[in-house]
Amino acid sequence: MLTRNEFESLSHKPTPWTKEEEYNIKEYLRFIRDSQEYKEYMSKENIGLLNDFQKTTYSLQEKKDSNIPLNQNETIILTSGAKILANSKKEKKEILEEKAYIKTLKRNNAYDRHGGISASLATLFIVINLGIFIAGLILMLN
């Protein structure tokens, strides 16, 4: 796999990539995409790789916004980086929505448990009182 410096130099290379360089770039991008999913479980070194990739993508975006022409390699890195970062933001939003939904389910289940406990206590109270009443009737009739 590529190092940070190799990726940086290949992303700004003015000539088209060779087949081997293109393969290495694709592998690096695949690694970055997969790393976005497991960011919270990764080491500081790998998180640093993600941060460097984001910086590279943002610097290319600024270059493009400043109307500085990008070469073919920089354009490929920019579009791939934009897709990877957009997917990670979308996934984070979905995860937050899912966690919020789970919290509401837990709250609703908590309310249901209290109602179940109240109903069972009321039923138990009625059965005990009915038992005492029937026992008293049986004693009076004997």
Image (spheres, rainbow, N blue to C red):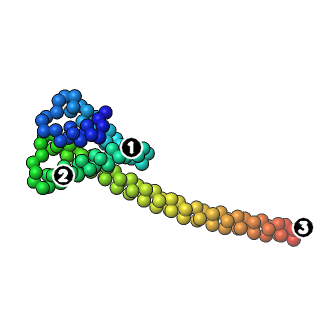
Image: 103 above or below 79: below
Q: Residue at x 77, y 65 (%)?
A: 131
Residue named by callout 2: 61
Q: CA distance from mark 1 to mark 2?
A: 24 Å
Residue 62 lies in quadrant: bottom left
The percent position of residue 100, horizontal first and vertical second, equals 42, 59
Q: Is 123 left or right of 5, judged from the image as shown? A: right
Q: How many marks?
A: 3
Q: Residue at x 10, y 54 (%)?
A: 67
Q: Nearer the viewer, residue 85 or 125?
A: 85
The percent position of residue 12, horizontal first and vertical second, equals 17, 41
Q: CA distance from mark 3 to mark 1?
A: 87 Å
* Residue 29 in view of the camera: no
Looking at the picture, which amino acid does disc 1 mark? Answer: Glu
Q: Nearer the viewer, residue 122 or 83?
A: 83
Q: Is 52 left or right of 98, judged from the image as shown? A: left
At numbered mark 1, what does the secondary structure look like: helix, strand or loop? helix
Q: Residue at x 24, y 47 (%)?
A: 56
Q: Quadrant of the N terminus?
A: top left
Q: Please tell me which of labels 3 and 1 falls first in the chain.
A: 1
Q: Are marks 2 and 3 in contact (CB under 8 Å)?
A: no
Looking at the picture, which amino acid does disc 2 mark? Answer: Gln
Looking at the picture, which amino acid does disc 3 mark? Answer: Asn
At numbered mark 3, what does the secondary structure look like: helix, strand or loop? loop
Q: Please tell me which of labels 2 and 3 falls first in the chain.
A: 2
Residue named by callout 1: 45
Residue named by callout 3: 142
Image: 102 above or below 81: below
Q: Are marks 3 and 1 in contact (CB under 8 Å)?
A: no
Identify the mark at residue 105; answer none if there is no mark.
none
